[in-house]
């Protein structure tokens, strides 16, 4: 049975703005403590099962390290080595078994539907480690895709690097690349969450690759209930470059729209690339971000990737502080309320 303090991190739209802000405070506090040499075993004896059916460097290492640093344990479960999906065990059964043993589950899947089924059957909190269908035309995945833990690390990085005189709600964030529904799981979460925090989101893409009117209406309606951040789509990144605090890009999965590598390059680059020309129009205080891994000289030129306004590696490192905060925020209340003997 699910505990009254049970909380998943599946869709960030299930989290209130207050909860997101509290979570960010926890992440930043734990990072500040780490910098002062203080590391508390807040999740001593707690176990996290980590299921992956896609490759990962940052997500896997950050969750595993975070659990170890918090005094708990993480187990890596490669999707190929589990029974789920073989026809002998359903996702429901796998979720029931794993959650009867582990204290929490982190799951990365090609399909949001698999994560949803797992969440529904799990008796412990589930954290989405990403749902990103690489080849939607092959029948995997769905239009809906998310990468919530990435977006929490993005926010930590933005809080740390924003101009001192600005709040989150004063920021302008520009996404460059493919903005269409279901193409980039990270941007989909930026689009739905950031305006709720008051952040102005600019989607700079060829018009064909803008989010749908339906998606924009949904995100604007959600924003109107919270931070009321503006959402703008443009096919001219230079129009808003001088107002942008953070430029963000990601991999264009050209397989998804059935064109060749050369054709995809011509559609998006260099116009929707983070490059020297764009940065010449940007404030000196602006930063460039990418969730990584990525393609040098496709979505971002080498010179900017390694340049003075690049926060690519600090963002990668912040995945660790995001996971620590997420794990503590979700699991600490459960541990405190269910296992007083472990205090
Ligand atoms: N950004 C991200 O999720 O990286 P990994 O695929 O390496 O986990």
Image (cartoon, rainbow, N blue to C red):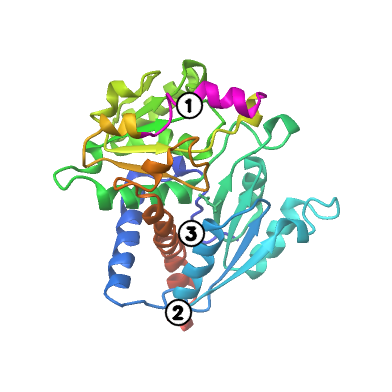
Q: Residue 269 carries which label?
A: 1
Q: Is residue 16 visible?
A: yes
Q: Does the magenta stretch include residue 58?
A: no
Which dot marks residue 4?
Answer: 3
Residue 268 magenta-drawn?
Answer: yes
Q: In the depicted view, which residue is nearer to us: 265 or 169?
A: 265
Mark identifier at residue 237: none
x, y percent for residue 280: 27, 32
Where is residue 252 shown, x and y percent of the image? Answer: 55, 33
Check disc 1 and report its element: helix, strand or loop: loop
Q: Which residue is at a point 53% across and 78% down the rendered structure image? A: 45
Placement of the C terminus among the 4 image quadrants:
bottom left
Q: In this picture, which residue range is highlighted in magenta?
A: 258-275
Determine the CA span between mark 1 and mark 2: 57 Å
User: Is label 2 in a helix, a strand or a loop?
Assistant: helix
Q: Which of marks 1 and 3 is nearer the N terminus?
A: 3
Q: Badge 3: few (under 14), some or many (20 or more) residues near its Cα, within 10 Å? A: few
Tell which of 312 and 126 is nearer to you: 312
Picture quarter containing residue 192?
A: top left
Q: Farthest residue in the bottom direction?
A: 341
Picture disc at residue 340: 2
């Amino acid at each position: 049975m699910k505990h009254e303090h049970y909380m998943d991190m599946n869709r960030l739209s299930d989290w209130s703005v207050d909860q997101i802000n509290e979570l960010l405070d926890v992440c930043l506090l734990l990072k500040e403590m780490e910098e002062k040499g203080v590391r508390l075993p807040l999740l001593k004896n707690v176990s996290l099962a980590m299921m992956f059916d896609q490759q990962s460097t940052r997500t896997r290492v950050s969750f595993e390290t975070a659990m170890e640093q918090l005094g708990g344990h993480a187990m890596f479960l490669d999707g190929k080595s589990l029974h789920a999906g073989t026809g002998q065990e359903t996702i429901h059964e796998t979720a029931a078994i794993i959650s009867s043993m582990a204290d929490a589950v982190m799951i990365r899947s090609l399909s949001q539907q698999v994560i949803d089924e797992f969440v529904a059957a799990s008796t412990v909190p589930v954290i989405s480690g990403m749902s990103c269908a690489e080849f939607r035309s092959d029948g995997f995945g769905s239009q809906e895709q998310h990468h919530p833990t990435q977006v929490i690390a993005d926010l930590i990085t933005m809080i740390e690097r924003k101009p001192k005189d600005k709040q989150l709600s004063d920021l302008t964030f520009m996404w460059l690349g493919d903005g269409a529904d279901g193409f980039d799981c990270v941007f989909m979460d930026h689009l739905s969450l950031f305006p709720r925090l008051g952040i102005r989101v600019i989607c700079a893409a060829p018009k064909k690759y803008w989010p749908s009117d339906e998606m924009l209406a949904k995100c604007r309606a959600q924003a109107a209930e919270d931070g009321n951040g503006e959402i703008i789509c443009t096919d001219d990144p230079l129009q808003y470059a001088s107002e942008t605090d953070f430029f963000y890009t990601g991999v264009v999965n050209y397989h998804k729209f059935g064109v060749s590598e050369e054709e995809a390059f011509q559609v998006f680059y260099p116009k929707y690339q983070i490059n020297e020309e764009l940065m010449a129009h940007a404030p000196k205080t602006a930063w460039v971000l990418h969730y990584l891994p990525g393609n040098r000289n496709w979505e971002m030129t080498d010179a900017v990737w390694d340049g003075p306004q690049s926060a690519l590696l600090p963002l990668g490192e912040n995945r660790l502080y995001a996971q620590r905060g997420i794990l503590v925020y979700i699991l600490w209340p459960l541990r405190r309320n269910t296992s007083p003997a472990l205090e």
